[in-house]
Amino acid sequence: MAAIVSIPIALTFGVASGAGPEAGLYGAVIIGLVATLWGGSKTLISEPTGPMTVFMTAVFASNIAEYGLHPGVTYSFTIVFFAGVFQILLGYFKLGRYFRLMPYSVISGFMSGIALILIVMQLPAFLGHDAVQGGIVGLAKKLPELLSYVNYFELFIGIGALLVLIFYPKSWQRRFPSQLAVLIFFSLLVYLLPGSGNIRLIGAIDLGWPNFNLPVMPFDHNWSSVFLDAFLLALLGSIDTILTALIADSLTREEHNSNRELMGQGMANLTAGLLGTLPGAGATMGTVVNIRTGARSRWSGILRAAFLLVLIFGAAPLIQFIPLALLAAIAFKVGIDILDWSFIKRAHRISQGALFIMYGVLLVTIFVDLVIAVGLGIFVANMLTIEKLSHLQSFNLRMVSDSVDTAPLNGTEKEIFDKIREQVYLFYLSGPMIFGVARAIHRERKNIAPCQHLILDLKDVTHLDTTVLLALENMVDEALEYGKSVYLVPGEHFIEKRLRKLKLHQKIGEKNIFEDRVSALRYVEQLTNGG
């Protein structure tokens, strides 16, 4: 079943990318087999996907325009090769877990942006034209020209196939996938009906064994752009794969190995670059079909690749009769399925920040760049999160002095403090202290002035960020500069170790370091009583 579903998708993405249907079909076989053998998920199906195809479409177009057809294609597959190398390195250095920490609003905006690009870029094929370069902006400029001539035969095929895909009964989907149904029906229709000679078809394809392509760098030494594109493609494929692997985990109730999965995907894309096929990633549709039809081990992916190879060679004579408008309809439906309808409908009710990030990432994805959109979205999401955490953690800065009393003191501590209240400022921190808290610490420094003694209590701190550490050092330096006595309760060993590295103990003095708050308070009480 997974092999049958893969054929129309692989053909569609091969044609859409500009690499040709052969690159899509062999990509589905090679990527699927290698990723299954080396990957970290037993049931994940890997093949050319929408996001990878959208990226590679731009890569093929720019390289061919700059270097010509053959060199441009060669350089494009060099990018695929190095993308695989980068994915292997990401897995080797155990960075897979970080792809699971991406904010959902960023993921939603990114995937929906990819989906809209995929949907809109099918318009020329629906109208009977070749693909338009320049993305959505280029398409918008060409739209009047595209509408001046419409091939109504192809428009009928495209819209008809799309309607069948949308309204295809779900109960039939498991036994006979909708993509295969429209592929067979509309291809036969075009073949049998008279007057279909002006309908554009895939045409004869060469399914000889893939050619071996050694990586070749551009002759103008523009190596940086090759490595940058490769790294961005690796990130894109990694995000796509980890998201699919998480879906597979939810269906199988197992947990994949993210680092091994990235290495497996890297091996697959490295092989794809060497053999001149489309790159790929974890494919949600193929994975779900694979699992729901009973897959539980790696044998499902291995047998899928074998069946797919047999099906491709068996159907090779018939593939040439498939209309391009039909493939556009399949790609259009894939785009509709990728759109995150659930989050789009609810984002405004969940959070204004999430809504802003989601639509921001979506728009940057469409009009600027795929990976810039993800990077910008993560940056903004993290800044908003840090601001919220900093605000919440500022409540974990407690103080006790002559005028304020917010730190938690037990009975003994309260009794001692009441005796020395006018001379002591107790500054208490708890929980994780990240850099956003440094500003709140800076604001508290002015409250030290009326007091003679400063007790810095870090007993309940679980994490001390470098910025916070330096803010505390500034507080200590300022207190010592104005002749105050400073006492420290460092708490956890790792906190004390960081303070010693900063040589804060030397500034304060070892005799002013205490294991707990009550010891520090008693010491100050003895000093104030002349002890």
Image (tube, rainbow, N blue to C red):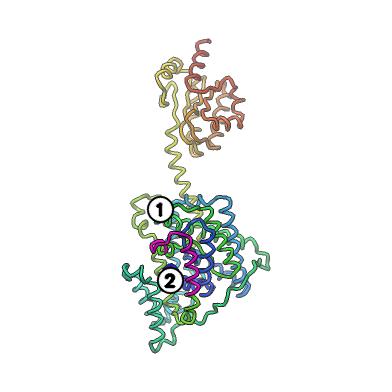
Residue at 55%, 32% in the rendered image: 494
Provide the major secondary structure of the magenta segment. Answer: helix
The tally of labels here is 2
Q: Which mark is residue 399?
A: none
Residue type at mark 2: give it: Ile
Please identify the quarter of the rendering in which residue 289 is found.
bottom left
Residue at 44%, 40% in the rendered image: 389
Q: Secondary structure at mark 1?
A: loop
Residue marked by disc 1: 253
Q: Kindly give the residue lying farthest to the bottom in the view shown.
A: 194
Residue marked by disc 2: 4
Quadrant where the N terminus sits is bottom left
Q: Give the x, y percent position of residue 169.
A: 31, 70
Q: Is residue 291 above or below residue 133?
A: above
> Is residue 305 shown in magenta?
yes
Residue type at mark 1: give it: Arg
Q: Is residue 30 above or below residue 429?
A: below
Q: Between residues 178 and 256, which one lies in front from this camera angle?
A: 256
Q: Give the x, y percent position of residue 438.
A: 51, 36
The answer to which of marks 1 and 2 sits earlier in the sequence is 2
Q: Secondary structure at mark 2?
A: helix
Residue at 49%, 74% in the rendered image: 310
Q: Give the x, y percent position of residue 229.
A: 58, 62
The crowding category of the residue bearing disc 2, from other C-alpha atoms within 10 Å (few below 14, some 14 to 19, many at least 20), is some
Residue 221 visible in the snapshot: yes
> Is residue 184 shown in magenta?
no
Q: Kindly give the residue lying farthest to the top in the view shown.
A: 530
Distance Cα–Cα, label 1 vs label 2: 25 Å
Q: Between residues 27 and 41, which one lies in front from this camera angle?
A: 41
Which residues are drawn in magenta? 290-310
The crowding category of the residue bearing disc 1, from other C-alpha atoms within 10 Å (few below 14, some 14 to 19, many at least 20), is few
Q: Is residue 65 above or below residue 475?
A: below
